[in-house]
Image: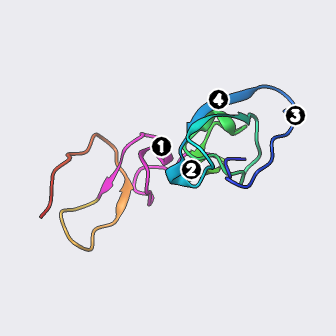
Amino acid sequence: SYSTDASAVCCERDYYSMFTFSTDGWPTTDIRKFCQDRPIGTLCGFADAICASSACVEGACAEAKRSIGESCTFDNSCSTNKCGYNSYSTDASAVCCERDYYSMFTF
């Protein structure tokens, strides 16, 4: 599990190596190994490779990535790998986009 309080265990199959950062609560910034083929609900950070479903959505293993128009926080949560605001408004919501998004600064 991608959790700062998870203990190391013997993996049933393979593992996935990835960087974890002390700024995210890990004791040190280092490469850590995470068991793969984890079930729905397991914490996964942003790593699809940890999940049996190959879908890490909003930090946890899910059945599938989110569809176009569904709410999101991270690109990785979307089947299109694109999460952006649905309009140029202060009350706009972030959703999975059909196509690419336009990045700009707001002041």
Estimate how packed mark 1 is, as few (under 14), some (14 to 19) or many (20 or more) residues with alpha carbons within 10 Å: many
Dot 3 corresponds to which residue?
10
Q: Are marks 1 and 2 in contact (CB under 8 Å)?
A: yes
Residue pushed farthest front?
A: 28
Residue in the picture at 30% in, 40% down: 99
Residue pushed farthest top?
A: 14
First in residue order: circle 3 vs circle 4: 3
Q: Secondary structure at mark 4?
A: strand
What is the three-letter code of the residue carrying label 4?
Ser
Dot 4 corresponds to which residue?
17
Q: Secondary structure at mark 3?
A: loop
Q: Secondary structure at mark 1?
A: helix
What is the three-letter code of the residue carrying label 3?
Cys
Which is more foreground, mark 2 or mark 4? 4
Residue in the picture at 64% in, 46% down: 44
State the residue in front, 73 or 25: 25
Which mark, residue 36? none
Q: Are marks 3 and 2 in contact (CB under 8 Å)?
A: no
Q: Are marks 2 and 4 in contact (CB under 8 Å)?
A: no
Dot 2 corresponds to which residue?
57
Q: Does the magenta-highlighted stretch encompass residue 75?
A: yes
What is the three-letter code of the residue carrying label 1?
Asn
State the residue in front, 40 or 31: 31
First in residue order: circle 1 vs circle 4: 4
First in residue order: circle 1 vs circle 2: 2
In the image, residue 95 sits, relative to residue 65, either above or below, namely below
Distance from the alpha carbon under mark 1 to that under mark 4: 18 Å
Which mark, residue 76? 1
Instruction: Please report the bounds of the magenta region as a residue range.
Output: 64-85
Distance from the alpha carbon under mark 1 to that under mark 3: 27 Å
